[in-house]
Image (spheres, helix red, strand yellow):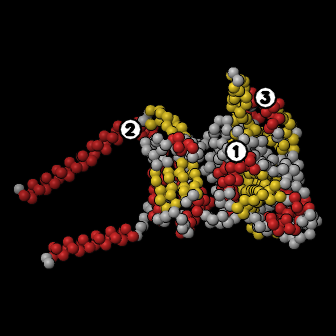
Amino acid sequence: MSKSTKHILYITVLLLAVNFIGHKIHYRWDMTKDKRYSISKPTVNLLKTLNKDVHISVYLSGNLPFDFEKLSKETSYFLEELATKNNRISFTMVNPKGKEETLAQQGLNPSRLTIQEDGKISESSIFPYAIVRSGKKRTLINLLKSSYFENQESQIENAIQNLEFAFADGIQSVTANKKQKIAILKGNGELQDIYQYDWLRTLGKNYHLAPFTLDSISDHPQTTLQKLKEYDLIIISKPTEAFTEKEKFTLDQYTMSGGKSIWLLDMVHTPKDSLMQNGKLLAYQRDLNLTDYLFNYGIRIQKHLVRDLYATNITLATGKVGNNTQFDQFLWDYYPLIKSNNKHVISKNIGEIKLEFVSSIDTLNSALKKTPLLETSNLTKILKVPNFVDLASIGETKDMETYSEGSKILGVLIEGNFDSAYKNRIKPYKTKFTPSGKNNKMIVIADGDISSNDIAKGQPLALGLDKWNQQFYNNKQFLMNAVNYLLNDNGLIQLRTKKVIIDKINKPKAFEEKLKWQWINLLLPTAILGVFGLINFYVRKRKYL
């Protein structure tokens, strides 16, 4: 065998070996400064335990505007990375053109956008959704959170930053076995299930849910407390009847044992039926007998109403055309529109949240850590109660100088080592008393309607969907984040803190200099090739002539 033949054989064997190793071993180097293509540890741990096939359909393909093309590519890059980590994951980028009606039936409502590119304005329908499936289970991921306060470019940036959490949470949702238990408190006039159906239905996909009443406390308080301690979280949604001392003591001891809780409270009674029928309502204090209980944890809910110039609309009947009632939208400062902030993972980059007839929360000095989750704008004023809320105020000219109360806290997260509210008090009944609890968490929202979905033709709608104007708010995402944070045992919620730096293009400048750069891209490579060609010609001429 000749020497040249051996060299060819060695090279062939080496190439085959490298190809075989490359096929069996996948490794990528993430050279980006923000490590945007690196999978975080919580997601890696999730993928290691994944033992079910998962398929992801992403409806961001086809002829897309520039910003959405960027989101589509970033989504594809990320899902490729997931697929290399676990071959049970597969994905498809789907062009929704021609499938609009089918997608709408699955709950994928298009975003209709006004696009300005190359100085031209056009309209486009985008489906910024993904569906994650495993077996018979499926979950819908909305990749783009709509926002009144942010432009399209900022929304795309937030969507890219949220990709890992959105898909990791979706994969866990369709593959995880239910473990933790959530009690939905009943017996104190709480919100009926039909009015929070969508939220409870979504919670039920990942957690065991059960109603829990405190009625038996009067006869069997110890037994009631022991049964309550079997739950990891209790949700109290818009109670309207005062809590007895036995009930408060039971909830206190539940908290001392490590139980988490979410309180959604209306401290001011605002009957909306009266508002719609009479054009006004009498707002007055609602006594839930919780002031001392909450004060012990370092918060106080004020018994007044907050009016905010950054608000959403109320829908009112304005007349009739034939037999059809005409409805119009009016800005209503009693319905604050809350912009999400980046102070905490629960409320980070989720879009706006709609609240109705809300009170403010004062945080008091205590050893517990208190983090605001929901805050108004700075343009607020206070309505003390009892007082009338009159629809006639809609037509009044808003005096900016009267909206000078500043930003108000409407929702707060409490964390730390809790002390019992009954530590130095007479106990309502005898039981094994726990004076101090281990590290725990509690969330208090001063709006009982934040979890309430609209009803249309007797059927509950998606939480956050306004049935009158079809505007979508992100109440459910906020509440789901709250539950996941309180019960989180695998760190996925921390993925919301991941920061991706997006290099932005100056679009006006790019359009202005478009022709110049097109000529540079056309002529510069040609010029470089010409120079090298001349050098090569000159060298060959010197060598052979």
91 or 451: nearer the viewer:
91
Residue 13 appears at what percent x and percent y?
Answer: 26, 73
Whether residue 378 is visible: no
Q: Residue at x 31, y 72 (%)?
A: 17
Q: Residue at x 73, y 28 (%)?
A: 317
Seen in the picture, residue 392 relative to 135 is either above or below; the reply is above
Residue 408 appears at what percent x and percent y?
Answer: 75, 46
Residue bearing the label numbered 2? 513
Whether residue 51 is visible: yes
Mark 1 and mark 3 residues within 8 Å of each other at the beta carbon: no
Residue 511 appears at what percent x and percent y?
Answer: 41, 37
Furthest-top residue in this view = 322
- Please, what is the three-letter code of the amino acid marked with disc 1? Pro
- Please, what is the three-letter code of the amino acid marked with disc 3? Ala
Residue 285 appears at what percent x and percent y?
Answer: 87, 44
Which badge, 1 or 3, comes first in the chain's sequence?
3
Instruction: Kindly identify which numbered label has been placed on residue 460.
Output: 1
Instruction: Kindly identify which numbered label has been placed on residue 392.
Output: 3
Which badge, 2 or 3, comes first in the chain's sequence?
3
